[in-house]
């Protein structure tokens, strides 16, 4: 699409295309708020003001129990979702959209994205269950799980995540779980750079991840 | 698809029905007066078309149709699965999806469900363990909690005359509970949908890991 001699100008052109795309996409959607955010930040998702800092938040890695801070490795991104694996409707949709988004990243970028899922249902989500679930969708994953309700609540609260496990008898495995189905994208400083609401389209996830990985100076 | 030089009476009626349908669709975009006028004139013709047209399988008018059925299960804990589809009520009578079922070899129970976003009512707080070590008083009230996606059974799913109701992820769906075996991507399952007016409608749902 871009002639070779114009290579130097290509990033700017692509950047402008992104902005145009976002404004169009959101404008037709009818939700005014994300559109204005997108126009000023170049990101398609929701950007909080001020940005949310979660570097001090941690949850245990499911298998080892080692605390993992909510911070990506240098130059990478950590995508965090609070959910549960028995979730038949909401979670698989977000996970499969996210998988497509990561698969569609330009060469070399997928290796810089880790997807972490913190279970809000540690009773049913044993460590191997959670790890297997994530491994079904992604190559680079972190399964986060604690059996301490206060520890989970503290971490969830830091993001503004709500969850509610239906009362059930011991041994009953059919209870429902309600949860905020937001996807958080965290950089290597522990800052949540963008949030994707439920139903966010995978192509917009791809552009947000690409923007954050290739233009980290955007704040 | 056989070319016929002279249309048979049935085909002609089909064409009339199609025109009537097209007319009412166009009118739907206009104002209310036009809609009333068109449907008033069209009613007898549509009736005639319907009575002679029952063998025309490709003619959607006058039928309740279910399309694009697919199902998905969670890849790890396959105790429950969800099925999605579009129901188009091409008849002139409101209908209601009363229930759905699958073979007992697939799942023990099937329910109609709806996922809705529940806004923070300021009561539930964030997280179950709210009253834990830090105590509720420390909650940051400046930051509203994100809405919770909450799934609950619904009694039935109304399908008004002339409308399409979509069962899709994050909204209305058919929940299969106590799956006998995990649903395998690439296989199909048969769903029987029971409607108040249309009776039982059997559809084949493709098991997929993402929406078609």
Image (spheres, coloured by chain):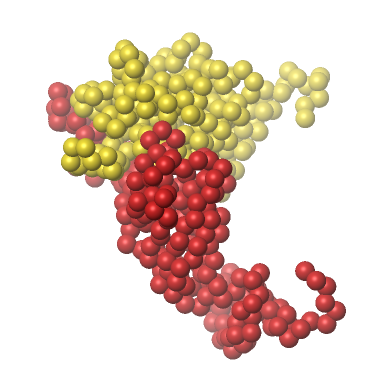
Chain colours: A yellow, B red
What x and y, as percent, mark residue B41? Answer: 60, 87
Q: Is residue A123 above or below residue B8?
A: above
Observer able to see residue A165 = yes
> Is A69 in front, or is A128?
A128
Residue ID at (76%, 83%): B8
> Is A104 in front, or is A28?
A104
Residue reaching furthest top?
A74
Residue B134 placement: quadrant: top left
Residue reaching furthest right?
B5
Residue ID at (44%, 35%): B75
A142 displayed left or right of A15: left
Observer able to see residue A40 = no
Residue A187 placement: quadrant: top left
Residue reaching furthest front?
B105
Residue ID at (41%, 33%): B76
> Is B112 in front, or is A14?
B112
What x and y, as percent, mark residue A192? Answer: 41, 24
Residue ID at (32%, 62%): B155
What x and y, as percent, mark residue A29? Answer: 52, 48
State how many labels appear. Answer: 0
Q: Is residue B104 above or below residue A204?
A: below
What x and y, as percent, mark residue A21? Answer: 61, 38
Quadrant containing the N terminus of chain A in the rendered view: top right
Residue A198 placement: quadrant: top left
């Amino acid at each position: 699409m871009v002639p070779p001699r114009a290579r130097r100008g290509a990033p700017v052109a692509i950047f402008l295309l992104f902005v145009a795309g976002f404004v169009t996409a959101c404008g037709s959607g009818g939700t005014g708020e994300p559109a204005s955010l997108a126009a000023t930040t170049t990101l398609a998702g929701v950007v909080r003001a001020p940005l949310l800092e979660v570097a001090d938040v941690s949850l245990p890695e499911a298998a080892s129990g080692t605390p993992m801070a909510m911070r990506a490795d240098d130059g990478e991104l950590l995508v965090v979702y609070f959910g549960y694996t028995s979730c038949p409707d909401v979670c698989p949709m977000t996970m499969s959209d996210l998988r497509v988004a990561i698969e569609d990243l330009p060469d070399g970028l997928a290796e810089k994205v880790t997807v972490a899922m913190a279970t809000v249902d540690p009773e049913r989500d044993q460590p191997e269950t959670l790890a297997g679930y994530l491994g079904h969708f992604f190559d680079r994953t972190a399964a986060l799980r604690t059996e301490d309700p206060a520890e989970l609540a503290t971490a969830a609260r830091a993001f503004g995540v709500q969850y509610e496990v239906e009362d059930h008898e011991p041994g009953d495995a059919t209870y429902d779980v309600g949860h905020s189905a937001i996807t958080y994208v965290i950089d290597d400083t522990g800052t949540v750079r963008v949030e994707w609401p439920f139903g966010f389209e995978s192509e917009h996830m791809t552009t947000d991840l690409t923007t954050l990985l290739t233009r980290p100076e955007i704040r | 698809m056989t070319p016929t030089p002279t249309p048979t009476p049935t085909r002609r009626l089909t064409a009339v029905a199609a025109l009537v349908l097209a007319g009412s669709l166009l009118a739907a975009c206009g104002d209310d007066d036009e809609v009333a006028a068109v449907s008033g004139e069209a009613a007898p013709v549509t009736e005639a078309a319907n009575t002679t047209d029952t063998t025309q399988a490709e003619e959607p008018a006058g039928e309740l149709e279910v399309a694009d059925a697919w199902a998905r299960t969670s890849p790890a804990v396959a105790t429950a699965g969800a099925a999605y589809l579009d129901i188009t009520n091409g008849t002139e009578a409101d209908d209601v999806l009363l229930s759905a079922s699958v073979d007992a070899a697939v799942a023990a129970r099937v329910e109609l469900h709806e996922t809705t976003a529940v806004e923070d009512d300021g009561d539930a707080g964030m997280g179950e363990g709210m009253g834990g070590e830090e105590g509720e008083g420390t909650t940051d009230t400046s930051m509203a909690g994100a809405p919770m996606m909450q799934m609950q059974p619904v009694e039935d799913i109304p399908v008004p005359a002339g409308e399409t109701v979509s069962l899709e992820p994050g909204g209305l769906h058919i929940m299969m509970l106590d799956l006998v075996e995990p649903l395998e991507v690439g296989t199909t399952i048969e769903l029987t949908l029971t409607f108040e007016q249309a009776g039982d409608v059997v559809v084949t749902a493709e098991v997929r890991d993402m929406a078609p």
